[in-house]
Amino acid sequence: MTLLLPEAVDTRALGTRIGAAAVRGDLVLLTGPLGAGKTVLAQGIGAGLGIERGIVSPTFVLARVHREGRIPFVHVDAYRLGGRAELDDLDLDSDLAESVTVVEWGAGLAERLGAEHLQVALRREPGSDVRTATLTASGPGWAARLPTLSR
């Protein structure tokens, strides 16, 4: 499914819908170039989980855990990771089953963290705030929920 997101508020709203549809154990992978809106989408996911503040890019700490929502939210930035071994060093397995895990820059690296996942590929139109989000469900859980994310 591909969605047009004319403004940042639309990117956040998509994230809010993803967060509202999320269940314990969900894995969401966010891809796209710098400035595509991955962190804004993650903020929306947090809002959908009931977390209204404190969600910033975890680039320098690699992972942040937010426990104040209806489900714990693990927000990971894999941009600086050198490979799967470094991802394993974050010990995310201990939180996966009880949380919603969102991995920015996770494609090709974090899919194996869960039996299924939702991938959101963001693209920003050059010289514009308009973004396009392509959502791809891997597994029956996200496939069943995918239609509810379109608005």
Image (spheres, helix red, strand yellow):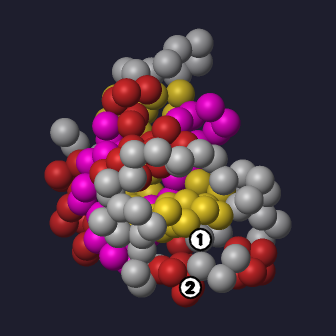
Question: Which residue is painted at 48% across and 80% down in the image?
Answer: 96
Residue at the far right in the pictured view: 82
* Label 2, residues with CA under 10 Å away: few <14, some 14-19, many ≥20: few
Label 2 and label 1: CA atoms lie apart by 11 Å
* Label 1, residues with CA under 10 Å away: few <14, some 14-19, many ≥20: many
Labelled disc at residue 110: 1
Residue at the far top in the pictured view: 127
The relative height of residue 26 versus residue 49 in the rendered view (above or below) is below
Q: Is residue 84 visible?
A: no
Q: Is residue 58 left or right of residue 100?
A: right
Q: Which residues are magenta?
A: 13-38
Element on which disc 2 rests: helix
The relative height of residue 139 versus residue 146 in the rendered view (above or below) is below
Question: Which residue is painted at 55% across and 43% down in the image?
Answer: 39
**According to the image, label 2 marks what residue?**
93
Which amino acid type is shown beneath numbered disc 1? Ala
Q: Is residue 149 visible?
A: yes
In which image quadrant can residue 151 be found?
top left
